[in-house]
Image (cartoon, helix red, strand yellow):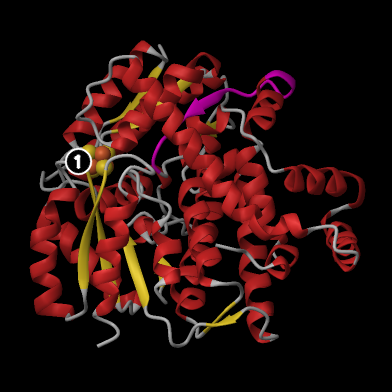
Amino acid sequence: MSVFTDDIIGFKSVLRLAYNFLNGNSYLKRQKFKERKKLISVALPFSDLIFASDAVPVFPIRMEKFNIHPYLTALDTAKNLLGWNWTTKLLTIARKFDFLEILDNVLDDVIYTINDKYNELYDLAIDNGIPSDFCYGITGLTGMFISKAKNLDANINFTIRCSAWNKYSETLQDYVPRQIWVDIPPRNLDNSVELLADNVSKAISDLEDVTGNFVTDNSLKKQFRIGNQIKRFYKTILFELSNSDFYPCNPATFAEILALLGISFQDYNSNAQRYLENFSDLVKESRERIDKERGMDVSDMPRILVTPVFGGWEPQVHEILYDLGARTIYADWEILNLLEEIDVSKNSDPIRSYAEFLFKPTTYGIGYNQEALTDSYIETAKELQVDGIVFNQVFGCHSISNCYSRLRKKIRRKLEIPTTVINFNKIGENVEQVKTRLGAFMEMFHL
Ligand code: SF4
């Protein structure tokens, strides 16, 4: 797959997102040793309380050292000297002299770099004896803790309704002695919101204890406002830009941007304000490019929702689909209700609002109730107006992955769009079978 050179030059926001993700190791070192901030690990997009306590959330893979594409490093050096706008001018000039053929695969390289690291950490966990029947996501996360947990001051756990996840969370004590828990009770109890609000309050006290900072209603609401804005931009990308007949870049690149957003959304690249600015620029730059018709007409390419991918997926899927004439949409956080906004109105109680927010993903999203989860898939597919669904069945997942047969029946009844299932165990392991399956699936669009 090739990324157009123009796409890269035009997409400063994407480059910054990619660079900030990959450069986590040195950014986090600076935060810990120079700024004296506490590093607190988080997986899944639950970083708000950490930000509100003025600590730094870390999706643990970001503590790793990545091979950063020399182009991104050069860009960062230029940015420090000249600012991002000047960097763009510099590149535009350089391009005239054809110095930068290397650009063609920068973003591709970013996604592969992240996934190579995932595989490496997966292997590390297996070598350290994690049972091989855990899903890829949990195994990879365990590898991340084995590798770098010593740098963390604490870890925060949210008990989602997946028993494997909760079992894994209990093992984290071995790597990070300071564990903070937010237990999410079942929604059907009479006082479930009060119980959860109490648990959120306890987690906030623990965060205050770890950081030495007070968490106030204002600091919570300030963080929720930033998070709400990020979610709005995220939805704009999913619902407006991904649904446009003209894309600001080629559709495989667009899918890579969605993949990068999906991964980085878990800790906002450890800096919520900077992440918000990048998101805002991404929407602005994309709209400008679409207005100027810079990019690609994709009106005749069916839009395929590929999901779930947050527990691990084969990143070649979007390239294969692109070669078969389709565009790929990754929208897990929307399906799992994690892009819902948190109430920040004047008289709202932020702790209660956060408790109400937490109930949505755990009631309609992860592992709680297959009926509700499959309804969420159908609802999101309808709203996104996708033309087909590829369900990614993750080996070792007994929670989300085994809802496919129910989902398939519902799709037949309620959506009448083509669907298929692909199997995933480890990146790079099953590519030929995925190609065959997707080839047969795409035949249905060419009848
Ligand atoms: S829901 Fe499935 S993929 Fe997600 S953590 Fe649980 S077992 Fe893994």
For the point 90% across and 60% down, the residue is 90
| Quarter occupied by residue 169 | top left
Q: Hey, which quadrant is residue 96 in on the image?
A: bottom right
Q: Is residue 360 left or right of residue 230?
A: left
In the rendering, at what x and y percent does residue 273 appear? 64, 49
At horizontal 27% and vertical 41% (from top left) the residue drawn is: 425
The residue carrying mark 1 is: 397
Relative placement, left or right, of 135 versus 46 is: left
**Image height of 68 relative to 414, above or below:** above
Q: Is residue 208 magenta?
A: no
Expressed as whole percent of the image width and height from the top left, the position of residue 332 reads: 35, 56
Residue 150 vs residue 154, the one in the foreground: 150
Quadrant including the N terminus: bottom right
Q: Which residues are magenta?
A: 33-44
Question: Residue 437 appears at what percent x and percent y?
Answer: 25, 63
What residue do we see at 9% from left, 78% from top? Answer: 413
Q: How many marks?
A: 1
Nearer to us in this view, 320 or 201: 320
| Amino acid on which disc 1 is placed | Cys
Q: In the rendered image, which quarter is residue 97 located in?
A: bottom right
Mark 1, residues whose alpha carbon is within 10 Å: few (<14), some, or many (≥20)?
Answer: many
Name above or below for residue 283 compared with residue 267.
below
| Image vertical order of residue 245 relative to residue 362, above or below | below
Q: Is mark 1 within 8 Å of ligand 1?
A: yes
Ligand 1's image quarter is top left
Q: Element type at marker 1?
A: loop
Q: Is residue 298 visible?
A: yes
Q: Residue at x 41, y 41 (%)?
A: 46
> On the picture, is 65 further left or further right than 411?
right
